Amino acid sequence: MAEADSRLTTESLTRQREGATLTDQINRAEKRLKLSATGGLSLSAVGIFWLVIGTVLTTFSVEIASLFPAAIQYHESTLAEDMRFCAMLAVCGAGSYPTP
C-alpha cells in the first residue's frame, strides 16, 4: 500500500511539474506572439508611411513620369523593340528564335 501511495505521489508531482512547464511555455509563446503581431507603435508608423508613399506614387505615376521625359522616351523605344521582337517570334514560330 505504501508503495502504491509513493508511486501516486511521484506521478502527481511529475504531472504538476509538467503542467507548470507547459503553462510557462504557453505564456512565453503568447508573449512572443503578441510582440510579433503588434511589433510596437514605431513599426506601425513606418508601415503607414510606406503605405501612403506607395498610394501617392501609384496614383500620380503618369504625372511623375512626365517630369522625366528622357525616361519616357527610353521606355517607348524599348517597348517598340520588344514589340518588333515579339512580331519576329510570331513569324518564325513559337519554337524557333531568330538569329541576329
Image (spheres, rainbow, N blue to C red):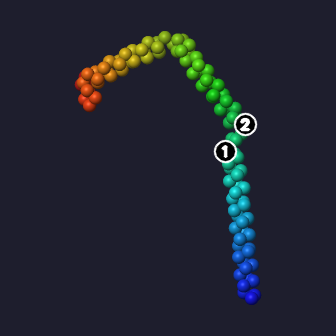
Which residue does the image show at 58% across and 17% down from the upper left?
60
Rendered-image quadrant of the N terminus: bottom right
Expressed as whole percent of the image width and height from the top left, the position of residue 23 reads: 72, 61
Secondary element under disc 2, as helix, strand or loop, is helix
Across and down, in percent, residue 62 comes to 53, 15
Label 2 environment density (alpha carbons within 10 Å; few <14, some 14–19, many ≥20) = few
Task: Give the quarter of the image for residue 24.
Answer: bottom right
What quarter of the picture does the C terminus occupy?
top left
Q: In this rendering, would 86 be left or right of 72?
A: left
Mark 1 vs mark 2, CA separation in Å: 12 Å
Check residue 86 in the rendering and tell me which mark sits there, or answer none.
none
| On screen, residue 23 above or below 63 | below
- In the rendered image of this protein, does residue 94 appear above or below residue 3? above
Is 77 left, or right, of 60 in this rendering?
Answer: left
Q: Which mark is residue 41?
A: 2
On screen, residue 8 versus residue 73, left or right, reads right
Q: Is residue 97 left or right of residue 66?
A: left
> What residue sits 61% from the left and 21% below the top?
56
Indicate the amino acid at tag 1. Answer: Ser
Q: Residue at x 69, y 35 (%)?
A: 44
* Residue that badge 1 annotates: 36
Q: Quadrant of residue 49?
A: top right
Tag 1's secondary structure? helix
Q: Count of labels shown?
A: 2
Which residue is rendered at x = 70% and y = 52% of the image?
30
Q: Quadrant of residue 55?
A: top right
Task: Give the residue type at disc 2.
Answer: Leu
Mark 1 vs 2, N-terminal side = 1
Is label 1 in contact with label 2 (beta carbons under 8 Å)?
no
Query: Dot 1, crowdedness within 10 Å: few (<14), some or many (≥20)?
Result: few
Question: Which residue ends up furthest to the bottom in the rendered image?
Answer: 1
